[in-house]
Amino acid sequence: MISMRKPKYSLETERMSLKSITRSILYIPALCYL
């Protein structure tokens, strides 16, 4: 994807990915129930 990687950027991307995963896990069942 991106050849140049910064430590801060990678950490931020990891945080965002974790947040997106948790959001999907929380939102998918909520949508199913609704």
Image (cartoon, rainbow, N blue to C red):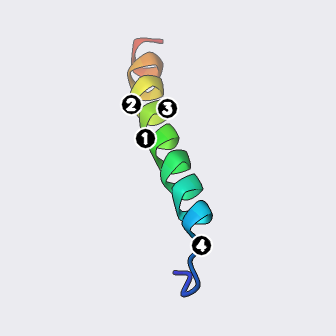
- For marks 4 and 1, the one nearer the N-term is 4
- Between circles 4 and 1, the one closer to the viewer is 4
Sequence-wise first label, 3 or 4: 4
Mark 1 and mark 3: span between their CA atoms?
A: 5 Å
Name the kind of residue labelled 3 in the image: Arg
Q: Which residue is mark 3?
A: 23
* Residue placed most toward the observer, 19 or 10: 10
Gap in angstroms between the C-alphas marked 4 and 2: 28 Å
Q: Residue furthest front?
A: 7
Q: Which residue is mark 4?
A: 6
Secondary structure found at label 1: helix
> How far across and how far down the image is residue 26, in percent?
43, 24
Q: Secondary structure at mark 2?
A: helix
Name the residue that disc number 1 marks.
21
Where is mark 2, residue-wise?
25
Q: Are marks 2 and 3 in contact (CB under 8 Å)?
A: yes
Q: Taking 17 as reference, is 9 above or below it? A: below
- Labels in figure, total: 4
Extreme-bottom residue of the structure: 3
Q: How far is the residue under mark 4 from the one under mark 1?
A: 22 Å
Q: Secondary structure at mark 4?
A: loop
Above or below for 34 versus 15: above
* Rendered residue at 54%/87% (across/down): 3
Question: In the image, which disc is placed on residue 29?
Answer: none
For residue 7, above or below residue 33: below
Crowd band around label 1 with a 10 angstrom C-alpha radius: few (<14), some (14–19), many (20+)? few
Q: Are marks 1 and 3 in contact (CB under 8 Å)?
A: yes
* Contact flag, marks 1 and 2 (Cβ < 8 Å): yes
How far, Cα to Cα, is label 2 from label 3?
5 Å
